[in-house]
Image: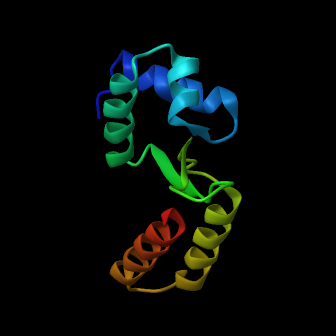
Amino acid sequence: MYLDFFDRRTLDVLRRKGEPLTLAGLVRDSEFARSTVIIHLERLGSEGLILKEKKPGKDRGRPEVQYRPQTLLNPERLLSLASLFWSFRGSRRPAGMRKAVTANWQETDA
């Protein structure tokens, strides 16, 4: 996937902050127009590079939506993949291992 200037800048802002940001926070920190940030958040989300989380608000109404970069190598994912690998070692069924790893990978993204 090709990341343009706006994609890279949006990811950089999210990574530098180290905590989930709202749309307003991203607009403020990236200094882009709100519509530009929305377009690039959708694009990055569809590519699996960022995660969108809904947090309950303090008051009634819509939940607060926060964005954070997807971490591909978090410790929990590495441990679960390592345990899957060791459970299939010596196995002559690589397709079974591939299916299990893929299912586990998708579970940890949800």
Q: Nearer the viewer, residue 40 or 24?
A: 24
Against 3, is 92 above or below? below
92 or 52: nearer the eye? 52
Question: Does residue 9 appear to the left or right of 60 in the view shown?
Answer: left
Left or right, 53 with respect to 79, comes to: left
- Residue 29 in the image: x percent, y percent? 58, 19
User: From what the image shows, is residue 73 above or below residue 89?
Assistant: above
Q: Is residue 57 left or right of residue 43?
A: right
Residue at left offset 38%, top offset 19%: 6
The percent coordinates of residue 93 (x first, y second) are 38, 85
Q: Quadrant of the N terminus?
A: top left
Using residue 19 as the reference point, say whether residue 10 is left or right of it: left
Query: How many numbered marks, from 0 up?
Result: 0
Q: In this view of the protein, which residue sits in the foreground, 12 or 72?
A: 12
Q: Image height check: is 33 above or below 92? A: above
Q: Nearer the viewer, residue 76 or 109?
A: 109
In the rendering, at what x and y percent does residue 88 appear? Answer: 52, 83
Quadrant in which residue 4 is drawn: top left
Q: Say which residue appears at 57% left-offset and 78% top-offset.
A: 84
Of all residues, the one furthest to the front in this rendering is 60
**Which residue is at a point 65% across and 56% down the rendered structure image?**
59
The way the protein has been coloured in the rendering is rainbow
Which residue is rendered at x = 42% and y = 75% of the image?
Answer: 103
- Coordinates of residue 83 in the picture (x, y in percent): 64, 77
